[in-house]
Amino acid sequence: MHNLTIAEQIKGLRNKDFSSLELTQHYLNRINDSELNAFISVTSNQALSQAKEADKKIANGKSSSLTGIPYAHKDIFCTKGVKTTAGSKMLDSFISPYDATLTNKLNAENMVMLGKTNMDEFAMGSSNENSYFGPVQNPWDTEKVPGGSSGGSAAAVAARISPFATGTDTGGSIRQPASLCGITGLKPTYGRISRYGMIAYASSLDQAGPLTRTAEDAAIVLNAMAGFDTNDSTSANKSVPDYTQCLKNSVNGLKIGLPKEYFSDGLDKGVEKVVMQSIKEYESMGAKVQEVSLPNTIHAIPAYYIVAPCECSSNLSRFDGVKYGYRCEDPRDLNDLYLRSRSEGFGDEVKRRIMIGTYALSAGYYDAYYLKAQKVRQLISEDFKKAFKDVDVIMSPVSPSAAFDLGSVKDPVSMYLADIYTLSVNLAGLPGMSIPAGFSDNLPVGLQLIGNHWSEELLLNTAHQFQMRTDWHNYSPADR
Amino acid sequence: MSLDNKKVKEIAYLARLNIEDSEIEQSTAELNNILKLMDKLGEIDTGEAQPMAHPLKMSQRLREDNVTEEDLSEEFQAIAPKTGKGHFLVPTVIE
């Protein structure tokens, strides 16, 4: 059952080939046998009762297409009654009094939550090594990182211990782990999926999205995830199309742009080869390929690593040990309570980013850092606007290399530099995808698809057409 | 711009974070390394570019001024580290 896509599982449930309870129990058994550390919490009892409920709905003909399909929820989305940790000691025992809008939406479909997935603390990281609950292993090679910050979600889908997982992407946190684990990941346009109840890292960049095996599955679940929400003031009041309707369109005549700045020094030769082979595949389907230029690409790193830490230093000031979350033992006074609760509750990378943000926003430095970074952000956005006058979709690598060894990157700056191909998309608020495109040294490599604002249909269609012609998305680490 | 240990301690305090004396050298070195990367911003000619705070240039939506929240104070206080008589408790601030 675990080798079926969601599209196939939906048919299986309808045809009574298996029940949601059987499907759910099967995945729970697989999670139980897995040693990847992909989950922070496994919610077996709740999952089994949700599955029974789903089976009733299906029997009564009251189901929607996703009813009874299991999924894994990134531990950044609030779930009433189930702890939500954001990968942090700070929220180790936090049980949210309310559900995130996304949680509500998936509940409304009677989907079955298997558990909450591991992640870099507060979504800050590109390797999942910054989790208070320990790193996640890459299912293709357990000595390697799965990527981050949605590392648990990506590993779970790749290892076939969940058919679908939610993720969030602030600077690449869906696309990069999807690439490193050989699955499909979509970061929609900013504002497409509600951020309500999604623990904030950098509010002007954060966006939720799906991690699935195929683009078709991503389209199916995006239908349920997307939509306007009055509880999120940055949610876009825009209708949601049926994302599955556009998948069959031909890519004949599609104009693909290759940004020359994304194929420069520092790109691993094996990764480049896989990406260029995929582009050839598109050409053979009738797509037209041309070079484009995104000249401010290199500036995305300093711009992102100012904007995101500034926003995080403000967002994370709410964790003060007073209303919820970790509180230190026997505080001497209020100041001691703040200082020790935060110092003991946050991990090193989170503290580092809070410090950078605090410094950049402190008196006298605002113009040089935050304001300047926002101007650079404008330039990056304009680069894309120009490029999309000439092409429909931009294609590139997702990450400069395939998965690297756990513990091998110790210097924060080296880790930041590896985000070069994903950050610009968030700064410009664009949708981006990673799809499995091949292997380099036996490790999966993703192809990045970048579209203009609100072009999710085109991206999913473009990805689906590739997956009709190739079978990289069908490779499973379990077959090794 | 390069930070010294004293400045790093000041920033940490602004963010209400403690840095142990045994960790200060390493923290300062790491932050300076990161800031070296950020200082590249200063070399970029941004010309007349307007600062971009929101990726979609949307304006903030306003809603009708209606009461929409229920009283969930008991649920909210149930997850607090320390409460009493309907209040969140902290160490004494005023004697």
Image (tube, coloured by chain):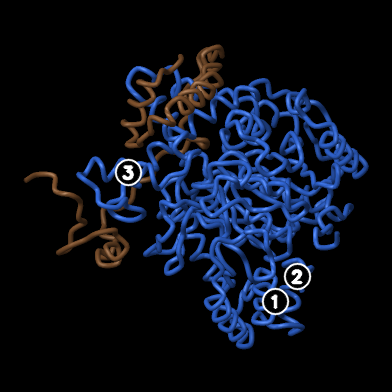
Chain colours: A blue, B brown
Residue matched to label 3: A340
Residue A96 locus on image (x, y percent)? 40, 62
Q: Residue at x 73, y 53 (%)?
A: A142
Check whether the beta carbons of the residues at disc 1 and disc 3 lie within 8 A of each other. Answer: no
The three-letter code of the residue at mark 3 reads: Arg
Q: Indicate the amino acid at tag 2.
A: His
How many labels sit on residues?
3
Comparing labels 1 and 3, the label whose residue is closer to the camera: 3
- Categorize mark 2 by other alpha carbons within 10 Å: few (<14), some (14-19), many (20+): some
Task: Report in which chain the residue with disc 2 lies.
Answer: A
Q: Is residue A458 visible?
A: no
User: A98 or B65, which is in the foreground?
Assistant: A98
Q: Position of residue A245 (x, y in %)?
A: 72, 59
For the question of whether residue A467 can be seen, the reply is yes
Task: List the residue tagged with mark 1.
Answer: A26
Q: A416 or A225: which is nearer to us? A: A416
Secondary structure, mark 2, is: loop
Mark 1 neighbour class, 10 Å CA radius: few under 14, some 14 to 19, many 20 or more = some
SS category of the residue bearing label 1:
helix
Kind of residue at disc 1: His
Q: State left or right for residue A213 relative to residue A368.
A: right
Location of residue A441 (image quadrant): top right
**Position above or below: A31 against A472:** below
Give the x, y percent position of residue A287.
86, 39
Give the residue drawn at x 89%, y 39%: A277
The chain holding disc 3 is A
Residue B75 lies, in percent from the top left, at 30, 67
Q: Are marks 1 and 2 in contact (CB under 8 Å)?
A: yes
Who comes first in sequence, dot 3 or dot 2? 2
Q: Nearer the viewer, residue A363 or A63?
A: A363
Are labels 1 and 2 on one chain?
yes
Answer left or right for B61 relative to A74: left
